[in-house]
């Protein structure tokens, strides 16, 4: 049965499909690399901003504050 399935699959092999899949795979890998680079850059920027932050400027909600208490007036 396995030989029959492999024969069926290999007889349907289309080099154009393989090339299309390979090109799509390359494009997806490049997109992933670009997104990972963006995440690293944003993390670095966030770290720089966090280092410059003055903790006294942070607004910390009071104990027991509800979401409604934190809404703008």
Image (spheres, helix red, strand yellow):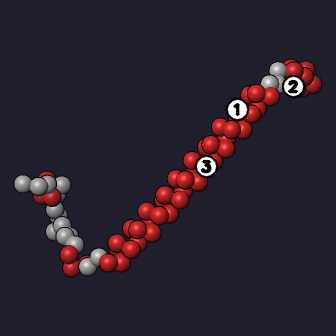
Q: Residues within 10 Å of mark 1 (few under 14, many from 20)?
A: few
Circle 1 sits on which residue?
20
Q: 54 or 65: nearer the eye?
A: 54
Q: Residues within 10 Å of mark 2 (few under 14, many from 20)?
A: few
Residue at 16% across, 62% down: 65
Mark pair 2, 3: CA separation: 29 Å
Tell me residue 41's x, y (percent): 47, 64
Residue 10: assigned label = 2
Disc 3 on helix, strand or loop?
helix
In the image, residue 12 sits, relative to residue 33, either above or below, namely above
Q: Is residue 69 left or right of residue 29?
A: left
Quadrant hosting residue 57: bottom left
Disc 2 on helix, strand or loop?
helix
Mark 2 vs mark 1: which is more N-terminal? 2
Q: Are marks 2 and 1 in contact (CB under 8 Å)?
A: no
Circle 3 sits on which residue?
30
Could one spot residue 5 in this view of the protein? Answer: no
In the image, residue 55 sits, relative to residue 2, either above or below, namely below
Could one spot residue 17 in this view of the protein? Answer: yes
Residue at 90% across, 22% down: 7
Tell me residue 52's x, y (percent): 32, 78
Q: Residues within 10 Å of mark 3 (few under 14, many from 20)?
A: few
Tell me residue 30's x, y (percent): 61, 49
Q: 17 or 62: nearer the eye?
A: 17
């Amino acid at each position: 049965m396995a030989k029959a399935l492999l024969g069926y699959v290999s007889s349907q092999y289309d080099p154009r499909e393989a090339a299309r899949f390979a090109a799509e795979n390359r494009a997806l890998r490049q997109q992933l690399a670009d997104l990972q680079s963006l995440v690293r850059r944003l993390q670095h920027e966030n770290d720089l901003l966090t280092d410059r932050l003055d903790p006294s400027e942070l607004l910390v909600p009071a104990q027991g504050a509800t979401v409604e208490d934190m809404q703008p007036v």
